Amino acid sequence: MSRRATRVVHWAVLGVLCLGASAWADESREADGRMRGQATAPVTLIEYSDFTCGYCLKFFKETWPRLQARYVESGKVRFLYRDYPRADQGPGLEAAIAARCSGAQGKYWAMHDRLFAEGGRLGKAVYVRQAAAIGLDQPAFERCLKEGRYTASIFEDRQEANRWGFHGTPGFILMHTAGGATEKEPAIAIPGAFPFEMFAEEIDRLLASAPQSKGGGRAD
């Protein structure tokens, strides 16, 4: 990605950077099951997260349900989840692999939500128990987990986050779905688990200037 336009948000806007990102819009990323909402929703929200991160859990429990109800379920925002394990090994990476292995059987979000609901109490016994609870093919799931499939892809997500300027979790990117980030409409980087109201303010601003969507498929 080349640096072009990302607007960084804290409690106030701090600056303008840019990435002419294409990876966030790649169809293969949508097809891997890590999208919620309509593919053609006018605004895209990307989360870079770690299943062991306390602030990521705070977002999941407090902010995400309100965003989902107001914007995702109404077709205004599509939500993309990206992995950012903070360590190169250990439960953060293992949980990300467990979620991806579940996604291979069409149950990504079922595992994702259950892993966050564990509140950081993660390990192989948890992954196997949750895999059984959501009806996965257990031998296939455990093979996937043991082989560490998707590890390279998970670290690619983390590198993508680094290119946006994130070096911790959670990190969020907001942008128009059509056209992506431009100098006129830069992507908005939110580095942290800020309150719902901050997300809503930025989403509403993007919606007001977004091209009209023709609707599309839904994945949740």
Image (cartoon, grey):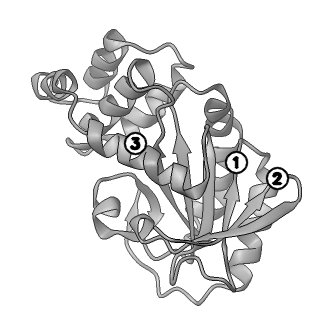
What's the distance in space between the residues labelled 2 and 1, CA to CA?
7 Å
Eyeballing the image, is 72 above or below 134? below
What's the distance in space between the residues labelled 3 and 2, CA to CA?
29 Å
- Which residue appears at 53% of the width and 77% of the height? 180
Residue 10, disc: 2
| Closer to us: 86 or 138 | 86
Residue indicated by mark 3? 109
Q: Residue 35, located in which quarter of the rendered image?
A: bottom left
Secondary structure of residue under mark 2: loop
Q: Is residue 88 left or right of residue 171?
A: left
Residue indicated by mark 1? 191
Amino acid at circle 3: Trp
User: Counting residues from the N terminus, which is met first, the one under dot 2 or under dot 1?
Assistant: 2
Secondary structure of residue under mark 1: loop
Q: Residue 96, located in which quarter of the rendered image?
A: top left
What's the distance in space between the residues labelled 1 and 3, CA to CA?
23 Å
| Closer to us: 97 or 4 | 4
Mark 2: give few (<14), some (14-19) or many (20+) Cα within 10 Å. few
- Which residue appears at 45% of the width and 44% of the height? 158
Amino acid at circle 1: Pro
| Closer to us: 106 or 169 | 169
Q: Position of residue 46 (x, y in %)?
A: 54, 57
Query: Do we see residue 76 in this rendering?
Result: no
Query: Do we see residue 35 in this rendering?
Result: yes
- Which residue appears at 54% of the width and 18% of the height? 120
Asked if marks 2 and 1 touch (Cβ < 8 Å), the reply is yes
User: Counting residues from the N terminus, which is met first, the one under dot 3 or under dot 2?
Assistant: 2
